[in-house]
Amino acid sequence: MIQDKVKTQIEQLKKQSEKLQAGLNKRLDDAKSEGQRILLELGVTTDPKQLTLNELVTELRAANPTVKEFIRKLDVATYDNRFRLNWDTSMISAYAKQQAEKSYIKDLKPKLEEVRNTVTEQLKEVQAKAKELKARISA
């Protein structure tokens, strides 16, 4: 009984792991191809996989004789990525805000209302007792 439960949970974990790995591999492949595209736009003609870091820097310097030209090409090459990143972060923050609002309405708001009602009732009781004590003192 317990062994079956554990086996089921392990299988579910394996499936989730495979799903996450597939998603991660896809993102890594996308990032690699995007990096190669950016290097191509910056003037690297040789396959980046075959270059050492020194050779890559040498090709970049040869294709971009001035820093101004390099920065301009870098700006153009990464424009789509920056726009996509800005869009993704905006959507993620909107989603997080929406989830926080749902959580607030579902969990926190009822508790706050309950506390407010309790405090209001206790305050009314204290006020009534204060009036009663005031009436006793003045009588």
Image (cartoon, grey):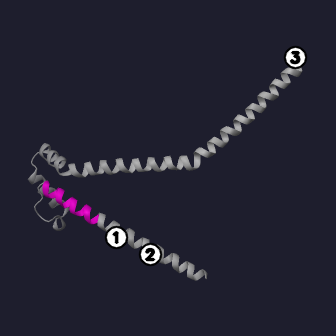
Q: Is residue 38 left or right of residue 19?
A: left
Q: Position of residue 81 (x, y in %)?
A: 24, 52
Residue at 44%, 75% (x, y): give it: 14
Above or below: residue 9 compared with residue 34:
below
Q: Which mark is residue 22?
A: 1
Sort mark 3 into few (<14), some (14-19) or many (20+) by Cα contacts within 10 Å.
few
Q: Position of residue 56 (x, y in %)?
A: 16, 59
Q: Which residues are magenta?
A: 28-41
- Seen as rendered, the residue at the extreme right is 139
Residue 91 magenta-highlighted: no
Q: CA gap, disc 2 to disc 3? A: 78 Å
Q: Is residue 10 left or right of residue 42?
A: right
Of residues 131 and 32, the one nearer the viewer is 131
Of residues 6 and 100, the one nearer the viewer is 100
Q: Which residue is mark 3?
A: 138
Q: SS at mark 1?
A: helix
Q: Which residue is mark 2?
A: 14
Residue type at the position of mark 3? Ser
- Seen as rendered, the residue at the extreme top is 138
Q: Position of residue 3 (x, y in %)?
A: 58, 82
Above or below: residue 47 compared with residue 92:
below
- Camera-side mark, 2 or 3: 3
- Camera-side mark, 1 or 3: 3
